[in-house]
Image (spheres, rainbow, N blue to C red):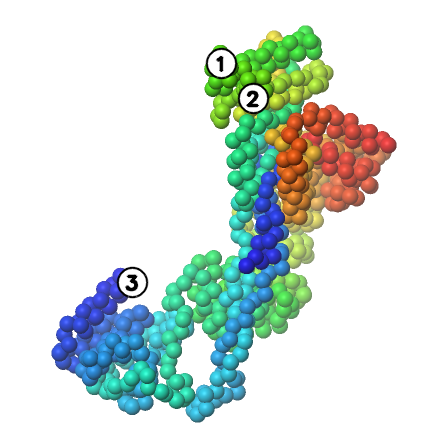
Amino acid sequence: MATPAIRMFRRLEGLFCVYKPSGVHWKLVRDGIEANLLKGLNAAPPQPVPHQVRFLTPPGADTEEPRQPALYAASVPALSRHPLVTGPEFQHVKVGVGHRLDAASSGVLVLAVGNGNRALNDLYATRVTRDYTLEGEFGTATDNFSHTGRVVERSTYGHITQDKLDRVLAMLQGANQKALLMYSNVDMQSQEAYEMAARGLLGPEGKSVPILTGLRCIHFQPPSFTLEVRCLNENQKYLRKVVHEIGLELRSTSVCKAVRRTRDGPFTLQDVLTRHRWTAPDVMEAIRQYHLSKKTRRHTHPQIKDSTFQTKEEDKERARQQHET
Amino acid sequence: MALSCTQQCLRCRNLLFSKTLASAWQYSTQLGYFTTEASLPTKIIHASSIIRGSHIKTKAKHKWTQQILCFNNFTAKHMSTEPTGRQDVEELSKADISHESSLLPIIDAGPATKSQMPLDLDAATEVSALEEIDDVEALSIPVPSAIPPASTSLRDYVDQSETLSKLVQLGVNLWKLEQRPNVGSMLLRLNFDTDVAPRLMFLKDIGVEAHRFGYILTHNPFILTESLENLQARVNYLKLKKFSSETVASMVSKAPYLLNFSVKRLDNRLGFFQTQLNVSASNTRDIVARLPRLLCGSLEPVKENLKVCEIELGFKENEIQRIVIAVPKVLTANKRKLTQIFDFLHNTMKVPHHLIAKFPQVLNTKYLRIRERHMFLEYLGKAQYDPALPNYISLDRLVSLPDQDFCTMLALATLEDFYLFQKTL
């Protein structure tokens, strides 16, 4: 028998994504959302307490000499089924986390509820790419490649032009393209490899070293610059190291100031839930949207549109325009 | 313990099967052996099964299986026919019932059964399971209740125990209580009329509202085991310290453990706050009345927080006093959170100490909230927290306004813009 809470839980099962703020561990985000979902689920109207028939002695009867059987049947609520005794209906919700984001980075974090965890595994079994924006700054080098670390080196950056930066980025992308071919387990001299390459399907199966499949500079204003990266099997530390190595390649040094994920597989910034919307009704709405989009995607072939991704600059630009009008 | 019980039980059964011709004397010695050891309720139940067995052996050994199946019936018959035996068995069955209903208290029924047992042995009459009995007899048959002797949950006892069912009706969350060690058995031992009701009446007399009882008992069930004189003494002490009776009532309902502290300990703790904060008695009263949790918790974190404020954050003593009087919660806050917020306020937003001391509410808000609001204002070019300059934004309004009001009144932007901005952080 489905209680209201169970029915609500059925509607909560699926995938959704949240915007993880920087400075917060992903586990904290996940636990907070689980607590919110539990609160929402247990706030659903409880089952009415069932009644049971019991034989009671009337309060006035003298128990000393019961000549007549002084019991009567009465229907009383079975208190052992009372919500205060049984506890809340849901005490755990299975909330799975997609590709992790470390504490210092922010951005799209995919979460799965209930049987959505299976879909989450399937999602990462396919080769999904992720987009990041990296903010870097020339002039210093630190021990952990981010601006919070201990400074180990300082350098000049006057000689760096956008042209030089683009050349380095192109070189890096070429090297990664080679790695992509190397890690795809197909013989390069075969017809199969040709067909896969023609359809753009070449790539590593499962685990591999991080591979950057796309790399471009979207903002350059020395000493700060912003890169947009599309990659496979990465972690955030690796991306910071990439920024560091770009600095070295340019005969200078650089640190990464922010790592922000703008897309994880099909989840983009448009459908993320920001911090104030991590509640059960909003999550339910997001999951409904996800199921709807899956239905429509079945009819139209998926294609990744470049225009859907928004960079920080575009967001800010739009906010500024809206603010001015 | 359970193992030894089952072993003895098996032994007893072996005896009954093999020595069918053994004399009553042997059984009585067996019984003596059992009852001297029988200090636990489960064993007493075994002993009574031996009595039954011995009757069967001496009188009607060919029908023993049938009679085991209808033991209750048999006992009833036996009670009505044999007066001395009846008394005895009644005593036994009473003991059994009381064990099963109260479960945890150990009733020492051993010696009584031992002394009277030999009289009982030849007293059984034969009854059939199919024989009809009238209502009165049926009533006097002790029905073994379905309660398990031990359980991990209070669920099994709620329907039978008057105390527990009344507590549920009061709104006490038994599910939370049973997770705490020893609380379940303590609650089961209580008697509603003698233990629970007087204390509730006492709470009502000092002015606690009835709908808070559930909250108080859920958090502090041990108030039910405190003696009434102690409770009264503690309330008198608080009143002596010039807390008004309404304040005492609100303090008790906010901090349920307050009345479990001895007068001496309460006095020590009040003294601690007055000396550590170096504030007047009326201010201490005010702080404690607003956050009575301070008196119940550990004092070590409070000391640490004061040191953090003084040394790490660099507030002056009068500023600390001002902060604590305005927001007592700073004393129990997590010190890492305090330093994180202060670090952001002082080093990123460049707010000086005296302004933070003027608006201590900011230390009590969420770090992320301050950060995203400040960054939004900074992005719009409105982050100006100096009261001497135009377009001043007070810290108080920055953190206390809800998102909608913050956007319209301080940032002069729409809520959607603010939410879009949050996605770019």
Of badges 1 and 2, nearer the viewer stands 1
Asked if labels 1 and 3 share a chain, the reply is: no
Q: Residue at x 20, y 68 (%)?
A: B11
Q: What residue does disc 1 label?
A: A190
Asked whether the viewer can see residue A143, the reply is: no
Q: Residue at x 59, y 50 (%)?
A: A9
Q: Is residue B196 left or right of residue B317?
A: left
Count the marks: 3
Q: Residue at x 63, y 69 (%)?
A: B210
Mark 3 is surrounded, within 10 Å at the Cα level, by few (under 14), some (14 to 19) or many (20 or more) other residues, namely few
On screen, residue B192 above or below B212? below
Q: Chain of mark 2?
A: A
Q: What residue does disc 2 label?
A: A201
Q: Secondary structure at mark 3?
A: helix
| Viewer-closest of A241 and A42 | A42
- Where residue A243 sits: x, y (%)? 60, 18
Q: Amino acid at mark 3?
A: Ala
Q: Amino acid at mark 1?
A: Ser
Q: What residue does disc 3 label?
A: B2
On screen, residue A53 above or below B246? below
On screen, residue B92 above or below B246? below
